[in-house]
Amino acid sequence: MKTIGEIISKYRDRSDLIDLLSEVQEEYGYLSEDNMRIIEQSLDIPLVDIYGVATFYSSFKLNPAGRHIIRVCKGTACHVKKADMIEGVLDDLLGLRDKQTTEDGRFTLELVNCIGACAKAPNIMIDDKVYGELTKEKAERIIKEFTGQ
Amino acid sequence: MAKVSVNLNGESVEADDGEMIIDVARRNGIDVPHLCWNVRFERIGACRICVVEVEGNPKLVASCSTPVKAGMVIKTHTPRILEARRTNLELLLANHDLSCTTCAKNLKCRLQEYAHDFMIQEVPFSGKRKREEVDYSSPSIVRDNNKCILCEQCVQVCNKIQTVYAIGLQNRGFKTRVAPPMRMDMNESACINCGQCVVACPTGALTEKSSIKEVIDALNSGKYLIAQTAPSIRATLGECFGLPPGVPVTGQMVSALRDLGFQKVFDTNFAADITIIEEGTEFIKRFKENRSLPMITTCCPAWIKFAEQFYYQELHHMSSCRSPQAILASLVKTYYAEKMGKDPKDIVLIDIMPCTAKKFEILRPEYKGEADYVLTTVELAKLIKQYSIDFLNLPESSFDSPMGESTGAADIFGQTGGVMEAALRSVADLMSGQDLQRVDYVNVRGMETMKEAEVDLGGNKIKTCIVHTLGEARKLMDQIRAGTSPYHFIEIMACYGGCVGGGGQPGPHRKEILEKRAGALRKEDSDKKIRKSHQNPDALRLYKEYLGEFGGEKAHKLLHTTYTNRCIIKKCK
């Protein structure tokens, strides 16, 4: 694993911030407060700006993510096809309520704007695979496959 | 820069090529309503209230961020523009917390003012409202994001002008908010309490932390009540009662404080003279020993916190002298309490200050048990109004002895360059051992944010620099850190214009208004017979009776202080 110092040494200033944050996240899975503070000190970028960029882009994570990432599509087509319902079903199944990641660190749930599979709405993506034309039952079956229950 | 001619509301006017439309309009006497524009800030074009029509462009454009071009035909107040402004205001109000009558900015809110001007009696849209907890953690500033319209004025002043970076924009879309990073509250953040964000905020999202309730309790506590008023208050308080800027109300202010129930009203100006005596003595000693130069003034608590956070390795450059507020507070609870045979605990001292950071300063552990509360100028005006005191018709009265007399040097403390000018008057005399005629050091005056002046004091060339706003201070501190500072003596004030532009002063803080306030202080100075701090007869008596020599042991114990390393970058693994 690359150290944070090794990663930062490749970048110069705030014009590189997004690339730097992306690489840190790739290596560590998320952007920790400590790592953001180390970037602040090393490249002399105000913490408030680093935090602003990290929270602006939904692809940056501020908390460690679960082993599987479930992306619920909230694009227009999925919205019309009741993506809200699918989100609620997943929340209940995984016991998430206001949290993003399950207690056992197995799943992280994210809302995304469009995954580009509108014809099969409503969609979710688990890791790199798209699951379309979801119903409550289908969603339950897919999650059970993952949890092995 | 090249000049171009544009047509503004049917009149041909000249403008710099690339100048923004709003600036051209205002220069020609046409005001364009705006919420996110400030002449000193970056133009972000966020509020869309300043929209205007440009011939040939089918859309309305934001005048704050659209540059003029040769031959441009601009209209600023057509029915279409008024309608667009009204709609944009309605949209801003659609998700605004409309608790106006119970808002701290009620009657001072620009959004409210425009809603009134545009006769918005009902909001046709109903948007989702923010529901955030109000942040009361700071001793100086209250942050209520439910009233934020994301105009970024606070972010601009904090990050671009002050370079403090305490707050910034986070998240995006509806969830966008202004806050310190990492879920810190205001008290944990890098905030230096200067209150310039409070002044910049057009709504009630940032307001000062009020001590009015505590002061009313104190007024009825039966304790011995003393007030002190900072140099700049007399030049700004009148504006809260409808007087034009630059009309001093010293006598009425003292009378009002007596009417409120204060037994004694002392003048922070008296302590300003003592500051100069101590700071001047300290400077001469350091200059002769060529030690820890440049020396930097320490009257401004926001600047002190800034230095402690960002330049903690350079704190030996700070004068060890307390601010005038803290000097008077120390003297009230020691010298004056002893003189009157009172237990300091039975005295309540309330400071009337131009500044939200003074609320933080009195909480510093070094000053524990001295000043009890700070009221800003704006808060004092509210208190006077609550007690239905007819302020403008009050007879004038004078400050109380033994800490009410001051020299002209103290009067100018409330503006940028004032402390330096006062110090130079005394340092010149104390260095030469003569009573020199010179009292005017014009090179240190004016509103430029960085001013240099070389002064010949008794054959010694002393290089001075005066800055206001902390972005400018940062430049000087970087020089000091690099060992390349050419100066001997530096004055730093956090707020634009000095204390007349403080975070607790009535708004708006436009340059012309601040200049008028400074002019009033300058006139007080030139009208005084004694204009050098070290000739203040009451101060000299105090040294003779109680403190001993200038910069002596007792003076050091009571009038000097220490600073703390507040490095805000937490140690990481």
Image (cartoon, coloured by chain):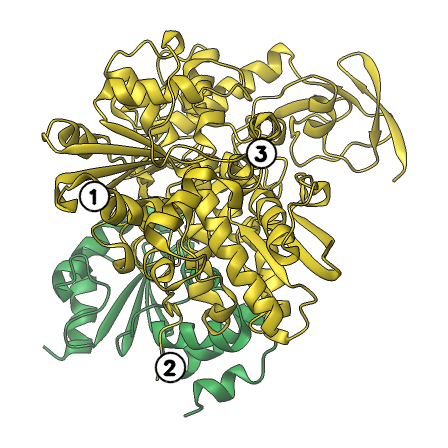
Image hue for chain B: yellow
Q: Circle 1 — which element?
A: helix
Q: Which mark is residue B292?
A: none
| In the image: residue B312, left or right of residue A81 | right
In front: label 1 or label 2? 1
Amino acid type for the residue under numbered disc 2: Tyr
Name the mark nearer the viewer: 3 or 2. Answer: 3
- Residue B264 vs B178, above or below: the answer is above
Residue B67, percent across and down?
75, 35
Q: Which residue is mark 3?
A: B37
Spatial CA span between label 3 and label 1: 50 Å
Q: Colour of chain A?
A: green
- The chain to which mark 2 is attached is A
Q: Nearer the viewer, mark 3 or mark 1?
A: 1
Quadrant of the image occupied by residue B6 = top right
| Subunit under mark 1 | B
Question: Looking at the image, which is closer to me, B380 or B22?
Answer: B380
Q: Nearer the viewer, residue B471 or B160?
A: B471
Looking at the picture, which amino acid does disc 1 mark? Ala
Between B298 and B80, the one nearer to me in the picture? B298
Q: Which residue is mark 2?
A: A28
